Amino acid sequence: MVTLQGDTVFLRALEPEDLEFIYSIENNEEIWEVSNTQTPYSRFLIRQYLENAHQDIYEAKQLRLAICEKDGFTALGLIDLFDFDPVNQRAGIGIIIRDAVNRNKGVGKEALGLLINYALTKLQLHQLYANIGTDNTASISLFTNFGFKQIGVKKDWNKIHGQYKDEALYQLINNKQL
């Protein structure tokens, strides 16, 4: 059985009440590097996004979920499947925990495990991939713990604070017959 609930966190659909939370993430320049954001987002645009968040992954080609503590409804972070390609059975995956105080506590690890299980079991994806800056050791450790392998490096891929940085492509291939 596929569940989006773990021991300490659960993943839920976005709600209109998440507007300020998403606004705070999308407009935090400190995390733009990991989210590939270049410009701020208005509340108006985020509200429009939330109004369309009900779209099915097959229609939107994306699934964004809030990461919440099991005993609460307040979001700690976001986790995404993006570039969903049902024909080739693959998708990109990304995760962000907003506040540093909630990082390195297993929240991201549990959330990522739940979404990987959902993607491989429920969506029957053959592969997942993640784009990770080569200096982002925390994310590299998180994804490689789930079996993601580095398959290439995109040199000078992202310009961060006036300096070009490399980005690695990590891939997880599901070799199990479903």
Image: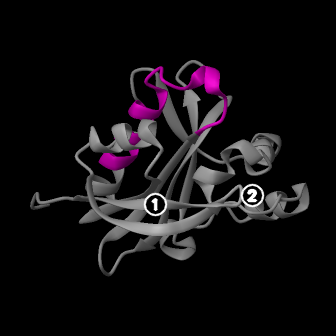
Where is residue 17? Give x, y as percent. 79, 41
147 vs 164, nearest the viewer:
164
Q: Dominant secondary structure of the magenta stretch? A: helix
Q: Which amino acid does the dot numbered 1 rest on?
A: Glu
State the image coordinates of residue 154 (x, y, percent, origin top left): 42, 69
Q: Secondary structure at mark 2?
A: helix
Mark earlier in primary sequence (2, 1):
2
Q: Which residue is mark 1?
A: 167
Q: Which residue is found at the position 80% from the left and 58% from the top?
A: 46
Query: Mark 2 sits on what residue?
Result: 50
Is residue 125 at least partly visible in the picture?
A: no
Residue 74 painted magenta: no
Query: Magenta region: which residues?
Result: 97-117
Q: Residues within 10 Å of mark 2 (few under 14, many from 20)?
A: some
Image quadrant for the N terminus? Answer: top left
Task: Categorize mark 1 by other alpha carbons within 10 Å: few (<14), some (14-19), many (20+).
Answer: many
The mark total stands at 2
Q: Is residue 161 visible?
A: yes
Counting from the top left corner in percent of width and height, residue 72 is at 62, 22
What is the C-alpha distance between the residues marked 2 and 1? 29 Å
150 with respect to 60 (left or right): left
Three-letter amino acid code at the position of disc 2: Leu
| Residue under the image location 74 percent in, 57 percent down | 50
Q: In this rendered view, identify the residue nearer to me: 126 or 71.
A: 126
Would residue 23 appear left or right of 143 to someone viewing this image? right
